[in-house]
Image (spheres, rainbow, N blue to C red):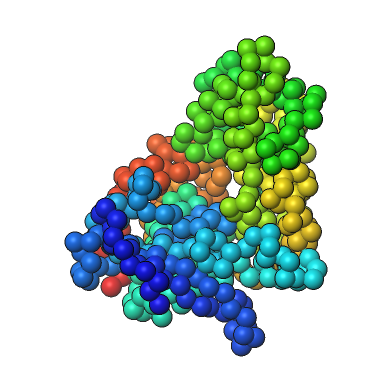
Amino acid sequence: MILSEYTIPGMLIRDRLVTVPLDWTRPEDGRTIKIFAREVVDPLLRDADLPKLAYVQGGPGGKGPRPGGGGPAWLAEALKTHRVILVDQRGTGRSTRVESATLSAFGHADAAADYLWLFRADSIVHDYEYLRTSVFGGGRWEILGQSYGGFISLSYLSMAPQGLAACYITGGLAGLDADADDVYRRTYPRVAAKNDIYYRRYPDDDSRIARVAEAIAAHDVRLPDGDRLSVRRLQTLGNDFGMAPGFENIHWLMDEAFSDQEETRLSDHFLASVMALTSYDGNPLYAVLQEIIYGHDDRAGRWSAERMRTQFPEFAPERRPLLFTGEMMYPWMFEEIRSLRPFREVAGVLAGRGGYPPLYDHTRLAANEVPVAAAVYHDDMFVDAGLSLDTAGRVGNLQAWVTNEYQHDGLRQSASVLRRLLEDIRLRGGPIR
């Protein structure tokens, strides 16, 4: 049903909330959750018969983007020709959320893990298909998958290609056979390379960050929420290095790290910023499911990022220059970070689980007829370009555009990314109608 309809500058918006089975493999068990979807269209085209473009958010655990107020660059481009559907994936945003209070409904961690097991890509595809067939008319629609949204798009092509007219993927061609170990074995060197670029751009930050780390190691430094700040938590700020403004964000944060010229005390601004940047109140699933999205067969993650880190001693907290880490989740985070502590036990259970249902149908992907256009960012810190290109060669009717013009957030930063992908499929005959 439509919850509300309203107009903001350049956009007519309709908000919807639907009920879907929690477990699509056993809908008869009666357990349900809510899925929120926001339809956005140019007000001048409100009655036009426009193709629908469903956005598939990255993450995992990310809600759909909020339009207006400096929203993503791609949205204005898409609204020229499409009716856009923004979905809050299960567990996020205005859909049935997963947060610390959610776990209070479960008596033990195994039961909570069983619940979170149902928030992977296969369930998300079923949710989108329900929206397509039951809410948005049933015709084929186009999808735009960013980052983890690209992983989900490959699952969509595997599970329900009959629902798709075209598929656009940005920074999200997953390795079809890669498990978490394969991913981190490749991404640690990429993160190290980003650190090298950062310190070459800001050579004075080498000594400044060393002084910050030494102050943290030598004192009981508390963040505003009471968490003790460790050097290894400071290192996780490097997740920002994969985005276009990331180097500058960290540099200017370090520029104001100390509250006095003598550098005797870390500033309140610095501590509040570090707390905000390294907490997970808004998206705990990002941390809890990070390694689960790479699950294959009986290959459990087993805290892969932590294990693989031992192969890269340059990331040790005591090494200098201090290297920042990237999109890696470590077991200690569920001890040290207030917003993740309620998930400590369930994260441990999920880390040891195998028996994953397959997310990609290799045979169906090889025979794929849905036109796919994919942007592969050559220097992507999160999704390895080598794995992406291997996948591109194994998916039928897929054309890859390899570029080093953008970082992982190229779609958000520049409308030209979506424009290029739309044109690519248009020149190949257009979406299936």
Q: Is residue 170 visible?
A: yes
> Does residue 415 appear to the left or right of 230 in the view shown?
left
Query: How far from the left and from the top, in percent, is residue 349?
Result: 78, 62
> Does residue 221 appear to the left or right of 408 in the view shown?
right
> Does residue 115 appear to the left or right of 409 in the view shown?
right
Query: How far from the left and from the top, in percent, is residue 206?
Result: 63, 19
Query: How far from the left and from the top, in percent, is residue 92?
Result: 55, 61
Indicate the quadrant containing the C terminus: top left, top right, bottom left or bottom right.
Answer: bottom left
Extreme residue toward the bottom, this view: 28
Indicate the quadrant containing the N terminus: top left, top right, bottom left or bottom right.
Answer: bottom left
Residue at point 28%, 67% (across, down): 51
**Closest to the observer, 10 or 421:** 10
> Does residue 370 appear to the left or right of 194 in the view shown?
left
Query: How far from the left and from the top, in percent, is residue 14?
Result: 35, 67
Extreme residue toward the top, this view: 262
Instruction: Judge whether 240 appears above or below 400 on screen.
Output: above
